[in-house]
Image (cartoon, rainbow, N blue to C red):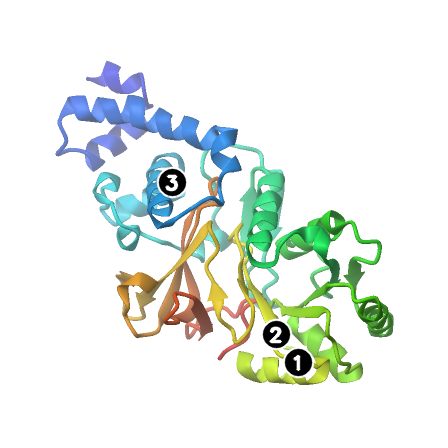
Amino acid sequence: MKAIFAAANNKEQEQDVNELFCHVPLLIIVDLLKINRFRLKNLFEDPHFKEDLTVFDNSRFLKRAIELFRYQAIENPLYKAFLKQLSVDPLTISTLQDIPFLPISFFKSHQVKTGEFIPESCFESSGTTTTQNSKHYVKNTQVYLNNAEALFKESYGELDKYCFLALLPSYLERTNSSLVCMADYFIKKSKHPESGFYLTNYEELHNKLLELEASKQPTLLIGVTFALIDFAEKYPMKLKYTIIMETGGMKGRKKEMTRAELHVLLSTHFGVEKIHAEYGMTELLSQAYSHGDGLFKMPSTMKVLLRALDDPFDVWTADDNREQAGVINIIDLANEDSVGFIATDDLGAFNTDGSFFVTGRVDKSDIRGCSLLAV
């Protein structure tokens, strides 16, 4: 028996497997170790598997999510230990609601990695001066960027259709921001000569927007919330060809306001009907977008579930038609090399069309730089 296990795993893993599958016949265990483990490992290392990452319907999402869960239950030491602590048998999980979600705080205290690799990037959360930041070790930065581009195209079309202006002070001052990495990639992919970053040079940004508006150039101004407020109050204007997209983030620099109040302020000062928004975080490689009213549509590679405040194992999806708010759980299929199942500290609710709101933060949780808005 030991010789059979040794062919697939080391002794420490043998003990874990015996504990996890003690009720399963030996031949089934051997099959799982020698076939399922390596099948999943080869599957997730296959470049073609990543290439079609955003081509999904609900049934394919479920299939991919369960495959990712079982893969990470074996290859991610932290997640494996977490499941063991919960006495979860990965083979019994067949629905999204039953998958255990790793608390997001583990990204602050541990290296959350699936498999052994030297990270190409290490994204770090913005946080505040009094919080410990999360770190996301990324095996392949281009996989993140390709996914970000694909998800943007789902919501807005090709990147080269826009001139991208990024108003991201404080983020630009750091070298490990996933948001800056994405914005820089979008700026380059847009191939527009006027695309670029802005810090606090508001007058230059104002003049550039006027030029772009005069030429009827579709433009996207993405900005951290406190900077957008500063800019809007100092340089109000009426925009027709520009999308204003907020990413959250007051950094304690402004009086807290609800997202609805923020959008009224920005839409009034910029003369636009709707304010768009991006929902992402350091721990995710996927993003959700809102075209207005704070309603975020779930992208192909990401699904939001809600859990009860008083019971983390009471989890539901938008399809369950439960009309109650909860705490946001996220499945991110792009998180192949970290963990794809994250229990966040954001509060949320589903809309009747399956989109979702972000309504605030769980009490006593750290205030995140990109989630300081409440509704």
* Residues marked 2 and 1 touching at CB (< 8 Å): yes
Q: Secondary structure beneath disc 3?
A: helix
Q: CA distance from mark 1 to mark 3?
A: 40 Å
Q: Which residue is mark 3?
A: 68
Q: Position of residue 70 (x, y in %)?
A: 32, 38
* Residues marked 1 and 3 touching at CB (< 8 Å): no
Q: In screen coordinates, is 78 left or right of 36?
A: right
Q: Secondary structure beneath disc 1?
A: helix
Q: Which residue is mark 1?
A: 266
Amino acid on which the number 3 mark rests in the picture: Leu
Q: Which residue is mark 2?
A: 275
Amino acid on which the number 2 mark rests in the picture: Ile
Q: Residue at (39%, 48%) from the top-left corner?
A: 57
Q: In screen coordinates, is 207 left or right of 135?
A: right
Mark 2 or mark 1: whose residue is earlier in sequence: 1
Q: Residue at (16%, 23%) from the top-left corner?
A: 26
Q: Position of residue 71 (x, y in %)?
A: 36, 36
For the residue carrying disc 3, how many other residues have a C-alpha within 10 Å: few (<14), some (14-19), or many (20+)?
Answer: many
Confirm whether residue 175 shows in the render.
Answer: no
Q: Position of residue 307 (x, y in %)?
A: 32, 65
Q: Position of residue 322 (x, y in %)?
A: 27, 70
- Which residue is more in the foreground, 284 or 242? 242
Q: Secondary structure beneath disc 2?
A: loop
- Which residue is more in the foreground, 194 or 364? 194
Quarter occupied by residue 24: top left
Query: Which of the labelled discs sits on residue 251, or is there none?
Result: none
In the current view of this chain or complex, which residue is farthest to the top? 3
Q: Residue at (39%, 71%) from the top-left corner?
A: 351
- Rendered position, 126 above or below 51: below
Q: Residue at (39%, 65%) from the top-left corner?
A: 354
